Amino acid sequence: MSARVDIPADTSAAAKGTAPLIAASTHVKGGYKKGLAIFDLVLRLGAVVTALAAAATMGTTDQTLPFFTQFFQFQASYDDLPTFQFFVIAMAIVSGYLVLSLPFSIVAIIRPHATGPRLLLIILDTVALTLNTAAAAAAVAIVDLAQNGNSSANWLGICQQFGDFCQKASGAVVASFIAAGVLLFLIVISALALRKR
């Protein structure tokens, strides 16, 4: 008894090419990471608009109340309060950073699997979110004080007299919290894009 195995002599490329492919790759270049990068760019543009709107609105917040004469007037302006000055500077820095981060977001669209730009964006977005949140929290405390006053310190609210001033300051604070929410969402998107798959 002998076991004999016949091996065909025809080993041409044509015969080898007829074998079925078992694990054909259906991976689309970029995939969901490219979609996340495009969404990142759109959100980043929205954050630029809201942060810039917050800084510009607070920076132009002032109101003058006429009194009996032209020489005696009451005035409220954002630069009367150091917290509002900090708010304007911080939101201008955040909006400037967001403008400067747009090229990195575009690189993430072109090269969706590159981790360097994503890692840089996630770190700097976290710093920008911290600055934005600090400015917004400080400003909301002053806006609340202007609205309600403080009965323990016998401080009266000024928003009954300076209604336009308080409305613009409140609008700027709301815009800054929207920008903070967008920045938080950008951090989550960058973290998802950095995930291995």
Image (cartoon, rainbow, N blue to C red):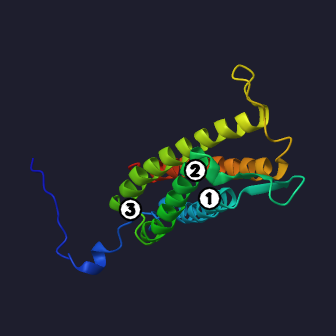
Number of numbered tags placed on the structure image:
3
Specify few, some or many for label 3: CA neighbours under 10 Å numbering under 14, 14-19, or 20 or more: some
User: Disc 3 on helix, strand or loop?
Assistant: loop
Q: Please say if 144 is above or below 88.
A: above
- Relative to the observer, which residue lies in front, 105 or 196? 105
**Residue 191 on image: x %, y %:** 45, 48
Q: Quadrant of residue 62?
A: bottom right
| Tag 3: amino acid | His
**Residues marked 2 and 1 touching at CB (< 8 Å):** yes
Q: Earlier in the sequence, mark 3 or mark 1?
A: 1
Q: Residue at x 16, y 74 (%)?
A: 9
Residue occupying the far left of the picture: 2
Q: Residue at x 86, y 41 (%)?
A: 160
Which is in the foreground here, disc 3 or disc 1? 1
**Residues marked 3 and 2 touching at CB (< 8 Å):** no
Q: Please say if 13 is above or below 171.
A: below
Residue occupying the far right of the picture: 68
Q: Residue at x 28, y 73 (%)?
A: 16
- Relative to the observer, which residue lies in front, 16 or 28? 28
User: Disc 2 on helix, strand or loop?
Assistant: helix
As measured in the structure, the alpha-carbon distance from the residue carrying label 2 to the one carrying label 1 is: 7 Å
Write down the residue under mark 1: 55
**Residue 146 on image: x %, y %:** 74, 38
Q: Residue at x 55, y 65 (%)?
A: 41
| Tag 1: amino acid | Ala
Q: Earlier in the sequence, mark 3 or mark 2?
A: 2
Q: Which mark is residue 113?
A: 3
Write down the residue under mark 2: 87
- Relative to the observer, which residue lies in front, 108 or 85? 85
Specify few, some or many for label 2: CA neighbours under 10 Å numbering under 14, 14-19, or 20 or more: many
As measured in the structure, the alpha-carbon distance from the residue carrying label 3 to the one carrying label 2 is: 36 Å
| Tag 2: amino acid | Phe
